[in-house]
Every structure is written in C-alpha cells, then in structure tokens.
Amino acid sequence: MFRGVKDQWKKAEAATVIEILLERQVKMGLLDANPALVANKLVEKAWDNQRQFFDGRIGNRPHKISFAAGVMAMALEQLPPTGLLYGPVMECLCALLTDLDERGIDFPVTSIDAKLLAAAQQVVIDQLSDLPRSELHQELDALLSTARDGGV
C-alpha cells in the first residue's frame, strides 16, 4: 500500500519539475498546451516503459530533478524532431542540465541519479548531433567561408 502512495508522490514531484519548465515555454509562446497535462503524460509514459529506473528496484529512488531529466530524455528519444513537443521538451531538458551545471547539484547524488543525469546529457548530445543541417546553417557556413577566403 505504501509503495503505491510513494510511487504516486515521486511521479507527482517529477511532473511538477517538468510542468514548471514547460510553463516557461508557454509564456514564451513556444508551447500551446497545458503544461501540467503534458508533464503528467510524459512521466506516466516513462514510468510505464522504464519503471525500474524510478521505483527503487535498482537502488534508491532518484531525486525529483534526476527523475525529471530522465523522463524528458526518454521523451526526446521517442518524439519526432519535427513534432510540436520536441523543441519545448529539448529546451526544458537543456535548461535543467545547464542550471545544474552552472549552480551545481544541491542534493545527494545516488548512483541512479548519476546514471539518469549522464544519460540525459548523452541524449541531448546525440539529438543535437543528429539534427539535419538546416538551410540557414548552410547559408551561414557559406558566408563564413567566403569571409575567411577574403570574399566579403
């Protein structure tokens, strides 16, 4: 009985972290959806697919920040890069990881926390390196090449 209550509490904590990050995306006009609904759906999907990372079966339960990072990383691996949620979720995960990098981690990091955060960082790196080169990127590269060659 208590395990179920604790599971729900931990999922709610992670969903709240994601919701707060998504609210920023709504305010900037980058997301037109209910942040709480999206956050809860992302958490439920990750929980259903990879429960063992979150429910304490393989050690301690992760901190809500690590849990949220893991959820967003798992979502990015499933979302199409051209989908409406991909950009906002990527921005949220990048913001979370950047904040941890700049301010430091202010919670005790367990082995599962370290694994989830490292996996989230790797997903961002992989996802960004897999993005196709846009026309704008190609045009900027051409301009910079021309400038280096003395053409501008």
Image (cartoon, rainbow, N blue to C red):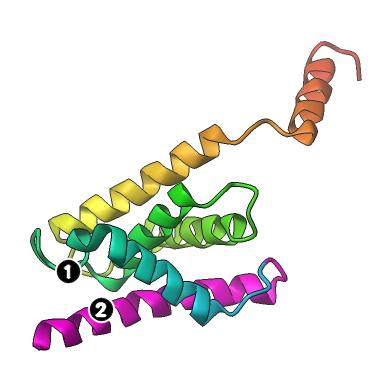
Disc 1 crowd rating (10 Å Cα; few below 14, some 14-19, many 20+) is many
Disc 2 crowd rating (10 Å Cα; few below 14, some 14-19, many 20+) is some
Q: Is residue 69 left or right of residue 81?
A: left
Amino acid type shown at disc 1:
Asp
Q: Is residue 56 left or right of residue 22?
A: left
Where does the C terminus fall, quadrant-wise? top right
Where is residue 53 shown, x and y percent of the image? 20, 59
Where 43 falls versus 140 (above or below)?
below
Where is residue 98 shown, x and y percent of the image? 45, 56
Q: Which mark is residue 10?
A: 2
Where is residue 94 shown, x and y percent of the image? 49, 55
Mark 2 and mark 1: span between their CA atoms? Answer: 8 Å
Residue that sits furthest to the top in the current view: 149
Q: Is residue 109 left or right of residue 12?
A: left
Q: Which mark is residue 39?
A: none
Between 16 and 43, the one nearer to me in the picture: 43
Residue plotted at (37% across, 70% down): 43
Residue plotted at (57% across, 48% down): 80
Q: Quadrant of residue 75?
A: bottom left
Helix, strand or loop at label 2? It is helix
Amino acid type shown at disc 2:
Lys
Residue beneath disc 1: 55
Disc 2, disc 1: CB below 8 Å? yes
Q: Quadrant of residue 141?
A: top right
Residue plotted at (21% across, 79% down): 7
Q: Quadrant of residue 96?
A: bottom left
Where 138 falls versus 125 (above or below)?
above
Q: Which residues are magenta?
A: 1-30
Between 22 and 1, the one nearer to me in the picture: 1
Reply yes or no: does residue 18 show up in magenta.
yes
Q: Is residue 20 visible?
A: no
How many numbered tags mark residues here?
A: 2
